[in-house]
Amino acid sequence: MRIEGTLKQWNDDRGFGFIAPNNGGPEIFVHVSAFPRDGIRPRIGERLSFEIETSADGKKQAKRLLCHDRTTVGKAAQGAQPPRRAEERRGTGWLGRLLPALLIAGLGYYSYTAFIQRDRILAPPAPQIATPGPASPSFRCDGRQHCSQMTSCAEAKYFLRHCPDVKMDGDGDGWPCEAGPC
C-alpha cells in the first residue's frame, strides 16, 4: 500500500533521512537508495509517495519512492534526458578499452624502433684504437701511413693494427689496402 508524505529531515553526507506521513504517525526512515536515480538530490519539504517495508532488524523504512515534485522542478522541467541504461553507461566493453591500448602500444613500439634506427644512423663509427700486441721483429712503426708505402700485405696489416694515424682502411672494415697489396 502506497503512503503519501513529506521529507522532513535529510543528511546528505550520510545519505539518509526521515519522512513524515501525511496521515500522521511516526516518521519513517528513508535511505538514498530508495529514491529514483534521476540525478536530483532529495530536498527537505519534497512530496513523496512510498511503500513501507520492515528490515531484518524489525525497523520500518520507506522503499520504492515516487517524487511528485520532480516532474515540475529540477532536470525534468529543464528538458533533461532520462537516465541511460546500464549498457549505455558502460560503453563498448572490453573491446572499447583494448583497441586504444593496442593503438598506444603500437605507437610506442614504432617510436622506439625509429629512435633506435636514428641512433644507428647518427652515431659516428667507432674509432679504431691501435692495440699494442706482440710486435713482429721485421716490422716497426716508422711513420708510413699509405698503402703505396707498404711492401706486403702482412706489413700493411701490422701497420693498421699497431701504428697510429694510418690511412689504409678506407671503408673501415679492418682489411687494409684492398686495392693494393692485400
Image: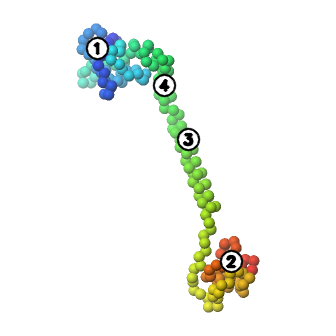
Tell me which numbered mark, 1 or 4, is placed earlier along the sequence. Answer: 1
Q: Residue furthest bottom?
A: 137
* Left or right of 101 on screen, residue 180: right
Circle 3 sits in a helix, a strand or a loop, which is it? helix
Marks 1 and 4: which is nearer the front?
A: 1
Q: Quadrant of the C terminus?
A: bottom right
Residue 21 to residue 163: above or below: above
Marks 2 and 3: which is nearer the front?
A: 2
Depth check, front residue: 166 or 114: 166
Residue 167 shows which numbered tag?
A: 2
Residue at 59% x, 58% y: name it: 116
Please give the residue where the numbered disc 3 appears in the rendered image. Answer: 99
Marks 2 and 1, how far apart in space? 103 Å
Quarter of image, res 154? bottom right
Measuring from the top left, give residue 40's x and y in whole percent. Answer: 41, 21
Marks 1 and 4, how far apart in space? 32 Å
Marks 4 and 3, how far apart in space? 24 Å
The amino acid type found where label 4 is placed reads Arg
Measuring from the top left, give residue 110's x and y in whole percent. Answer: 59, 51
Please give the residue where the numbered disc 4 appears in the rendered image. Answer: 84
Please give the residue where the numbered disc 1 appears in the rendered image. Answer: 20
Tell me which numbered mark, 4 or 2, is placed earlier along the sequence. Answer: 4
Residue at 72% x, 86% y: name it: 151
